[in-house]
Amino acid sequence: SVFAVGFASLSEVLISYFSNDNSGVGFFSLALTLAMPLALIPNSIGTSFFRNFASMEKIPTKLVINTILISTSALAISWILVPFIVRIAFGDEFIGVISLFYIISIGLFFHGFGDFINRYLAARGFGKIIRNCSIIIGVSILILNICLIPIYKETGAAIAKLIAGCIYLIVLYYYYKIKIKN
């Protein structure tokens, strides 16, 4: 996980390097901070069920549906509230944070579901798969950041976060499907 987190932390450094000023770093960091709870919801649910996952052959459908409903509701509520919060707390100068938030929030939404599956795989003892997924995500975010940030600055970093979240979920879901078949 250090590999993936380390390369994700380079986003701010690369935004600063390729931008005329550091306002993009602040906008990106603020949008990331506002969106982070969306990743924590499915992650927390997966962590709560960690012990139960150890004895389950697969993740219960009802748990997946409930997690999707809770997370989707939180995403919808945040999309309604965050624009007001940004305008009220920071003013119109920070309006750029809102569009970054929308992009990042979707990426973290998917990343949270990847963490949900990650908890199941960890409880079942598939640490090597999790390690390999972290390496894949780390390399993906690095490549995406290098390709997108020089052109699109903080928006490129947000798009990289979105794509990396999708890749993370897809890769973990792929391995999950393989393991439950066996």
Image (cartoon, rainbow, N blue to C red):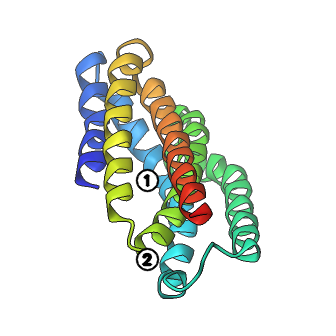
Please name the residue shown 37% across and 21% down the image.
Answer: 149
Q: Amino acid at mark 1?
A: Thr
The dot on residue 33 is: 1
Please name the residue shown 29% across and 49% down the image.
Answer: 5
Q: Amino acid at mark 2?
A: Ala
Q: Quadrant of the N terminus?
A: bottom left
In three-dimensional space, the C-alpha distance between marks 2 and 1, rounded to whole angstroms, equals: 28 Å
Q: Is residue 28 left or right of residue 167?
A: left
From where the camera sits, is residue 93 visible? no
Tell me the quarter of the picture where residue 157 sits.
top left
Counting from the top left corner in percent of width and height, residue 33 is at 43, 53
Please name the residue shown 42% across and 37% down the image.
Answer: 27
Q: Dot 2, crowdedness within 10 Å: few (<14), some or many (≥20)?
A: many
Q: Is residue 81 left or right of residue 6?
A: right
Residue situated in front as seen by the camera: 179 or 104? 179
Residue situated in front as seen by the camera: 101 or 65? 65
Q: Quadrant of the C terminus?
A: bottom right
